Image: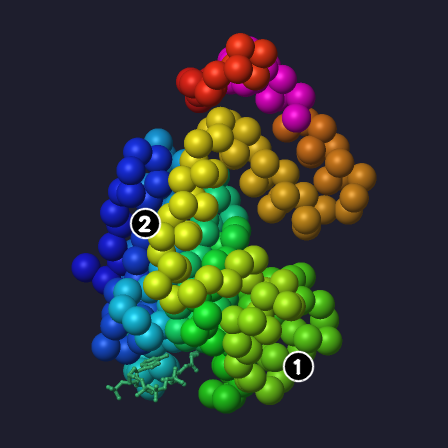
Amino acid sequence: MEIRVEPQGRHVVMVTIDNQRRLNAMTRPMMAELGRVWDELERSDCRCIVLTGAGERAFCAGADIREFLEPPVPTRFREERRRLDFRREMDRCPQPIIAAIRGFALGGGLELALACDIRVAAEDAQLGLTEINLAIIPGGGGTQRLPRLVGRGKALEMILTGMRVSAAEALRLGLVERVVPVAELLPSAQALAKSIAEKAPIALRYAKEAVVSGIELPLADGLRLENDLATLLRTTEDRVEGARAFVEKRKPKWSGR
Ligand code: COA
């Protein structure tokens, strides 16, 4: 199995890309599989997801370059759409997705990390959109998501040169949110996921939707979306439970309603 899905406690799921021989480069079937994974997790009671790469060398070294040499294979329409759409699915996935990045995150591998909601990198991480070295450009959202995080000039510098940045530089640029020692990568990403998973599920869902959908909208429309979602949250049982638990000085017990 090249995409592993393993529960970590009650509400956290760990998704691992495992193609270690090729630094977790993603083949077409792996991309389609990842699309199916988001679909399935969306319907599960998982509240937060950690995405990582197997082994010690890479989060993901991008698309499997060997496939670039193969003649195009006829794929079923559904499978092809999944393959192209699996990063968009991550925006639509109601649960927050945390990338735990160790070693290389290059090309489609960085695009995958960019499609996650929060990025935690190990000190050995090297990140870059290296497609230009292969006479192509990022085709999985990289030209759009990178400038939204680091600005137009830095994004163009990275995309036009194919340069790699270190974890420390990525943190400075706002390309990753946290940098931790290598040995602490998975424990700290999992601890972050667990702390998120302890929050009320509907509030988590709407918080992600407000930010992820809102960022694409003009401010006035984004504010309206926020207002709609905030208003909906005023009708939940968990909202009452949150306030009651605060007053009673106890931990809240979320029902997810
Ligand atoms: N697709 C297919 N195979 C890949 C790969 C990719 N994207 N990235 C690495 N591999 C394979 C290598 O071919 C090699 O396989 P081999 O042992 O059968 O020859 C194995 O993974 C290890 O990589 P190697 O290049 O020997 O390791 P390295 O430490 O010298 O270099 C990288 C590591 C990441 C710098 C280098 O592998 C690389 O540049 N990879 C391509 C990254 C890229 O451009 N991705 C964007 C694709 S659009």
Give the Cα distance between marks 1 and 2: 33 Å
- Find numbered disc 2 in the image and state the secondary structure of the residue it sits on: strand
User: Residue shown at 46%/20% (left/top)?
Assistant: 251
The x, y position of residue 42, in whole percent, is 39, 39
Q: Identify the residue under disc 1.
A: 157
Query: Which residue, given by chain and number where applicable, does mark 2 sit on?
Result: 14
Toward the viewer: 91 or 191? 191
Residue 43 visible from this viewpoint: yes
Evaluate whether residue 78 shows in this view: no
Task: Please state the horizontal and vertical placement of residue 71, each as a whole percent of the image.
Answer: 32, 81
Magenta stretch holds residue 239 = yes
- 99 to 160, vertically: above or below: above
Q: Name the one closer to the observer, 11 or 155.
A: 11
Q: Position of residue 63 (x, y in %)?
A: 38, 74
Quadrant containing ligand 1 = bottom left
Residue depicted at x 25% and y 47%: 6
- Few, some or many C-alpha atoms within 10 Å of disc 2 (few <14, some 14-19, many ≥20)? many
- Image point 68% across, 50% down: which residue? 216
Looking at the image, residue 82 lies above or below residue 230: below
- Going by the numbered disc 1, the residue's amino acid type is Glu
The residue type indicated by label 2 comes to Met
Question: As drawn, is 253 to the left or to the right of 135?
Answer: left
Q: Which stretch appears magenta? A: 230-244
**69 or 102, which is in the foreground?**
102
Is residue 123 shown in magenta? no
Task: Residue 202: give its label.
Answer: none
Q: Dot 1 lies on which element?
A: helix
Name the colouring of the figure.
Answer: rainbow
